[in-house]
Image (cartoon, rainbow, N blue to C red):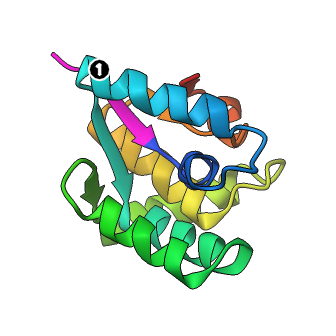
Amino acid sequence: MSERVFIDTSAYYSFVDANDTNHAQAMATLERFGQTGAELYTTNFVVAETHALILNRLNRDAAERVLVLLYAGGFRVLRATEGDETRARALIHHHRDKEYSLVDAISFVVMQRLHIHLAWSYDQHFASYGFILAS
């Protein structure tokens, strides 16, 4: 069985922005996942957040290229359900000591629902919630 990996906005951004401090590591990580045949998952919320981030920090062309890449078939874009959103809001309410974004919380509950334990993210919120970070 292939390794299942959830990919967060921070990983996509680091891969796209050659000036990002994590860019070289992101390139190596993506190459490793390609070589091992890892199953790569993300959510429609992460796609929207990634597009907005790249649009604002880089440019429209880069943001559009990411959309094309994400929907080209190498990544599984999962749709968050209404139940996922409800559980994510409850998670945010329950963890008042953390600054989890709604996108992070939805990612967490989708990962739990699908039993994905490995997150490719440079956001420490995934580790603080208990997921293993890919490096």
x and y percent of residue 69 in the render? 33, 61
Count all numbered tags in the image, as a single digit.
1
Where 130 sits versus 57, above or below?
above
> Which of the two residues, 96 or 53, is positioned nearer the viewer here?
53
Quadrant assignment for the N terminus: top left
Tell me the residue that label 1 is attached to. 35
The verdict on residue 2 being magenta is yes
Q: How many other residues sit within 10 Å of disc 1, few (<14), some (14-19) or many (≥20)? A: few
The verdict on residue 110 being magenta is no
Which amino acid type is shown beneath numbered disc 1? Gln
Does the rendering let one see residue 56? yes
User: Would residue 106 be found to the left or right of residue 21 on screen?
Assistant: left
Query: In the picture, residue 32 is in which quadrant?
Result: top left
x and y percent of residue 82 in the render? 33, 72
Where 87 sits versus 28, above or below?
below
User: Would residue 123 be found to the left or right of residue 98 on screen?
Assistant: left
Q: Could you tell me which residue is drawn at 79 percent across and 49 percent down?
A: 98
Q: Could you tell me which residue is drawn at 53 percent across and 49 percent down?
A: 8
Where 11 sits versus 87, above or below?
above
Q: Which residues are magenta?
A: 1-6
x and y percent of residue 11 in the render? 57, 45
x and y percent of residue 45 in the render? 45, 68
Secondary structure under the numbered disc 1 in the rendered image: helix
Q: Could you tell me which residue is drawn at 72 percent across and 49 percent down?
A: 95
> Which of the two residues, 108 or 56, is positioned nearer the viewer here?
56
Quadrant assignment for the C terminus: top right
